[in-house]
Image (cartoon, grey):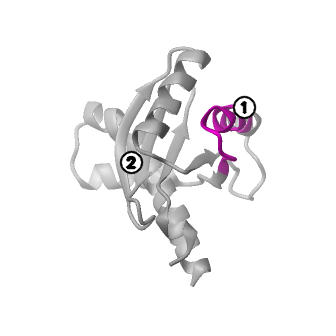
Amino acid sequence: MSDFLTQRLIALDVGEKRIGIAVSDSLGITAQGVGVYNRVSLKTDFTYLAGLFQKYQCTGLVIGLPRHMNGELGPEANKIMSFGKRLGRNCGVEPIFWDERLTTVQAEKALLEGNLSRSRRRQVIDQLAAVLLLDNYLSFRQTNQS
């Protein structure tokens, strides 16, 4: 079994106000939602997220990277990359930046199909986007490790 399959990853869908959070199982096969963190300040955000990294005994950090549909980096990409690199240093890992195109759209569609109310969708959409982001990354890694 490769080293990748024995590591637990945490994935973040970073927004201006909220951060969706998901973690993988210890085999790196499935992604589960952990919650949504309401941002306070960079220092508080980093402390909280580094604490989750330790709590779940993670060995890797996946950060959603906003891109345009043509693949170019979106306007928030530099902020996200700066945030991710700093958080990675706090956690002692090199962050993996992963294309997050359409994860929020997919999450919204899934929640609409689940017939959730608008207020409930707002509460969980960032978490589901993080789950989809991590699931996409895990699927890619599994396909390319075979």
- Sequence order check: which comes first, mark 1 or mark 2? 1
Q: Which residues are magenta?
A: 81-96
Seen in the picture, residue 13 relative to 2 is either above or below; the reply is above
Report the residue at 69% width, 35% height from top.
89
Q: Is residue 101 visible?
A: yes
Seen in the picture, residue 86 relative to 97 is either above or below; the reply is above
The image's mark for residue 128 is 2
Residue 90: percent from left, percent from top: 64, 31
Q: Compare residues 88 and 62 and report the one nearer the observer.
A: 88
Amino acid residing under circle 2: Leu
- Neighbor class of circle 1 (other Cα within 10 Å; few <14, some 14-19, many 20+) is few
Q: Quadrant of residue 98?
A: bottom right
Report the residue at 61% width, 78% height from top.
144
Q: Compare residues 34 and 128 and report the one nearer the observer.
A: 34
The image's mark for residue 52 is none
Q: Is residue 34 left or right of residue 52?
A: left
Q: Which residue is mark 1?
A: 79
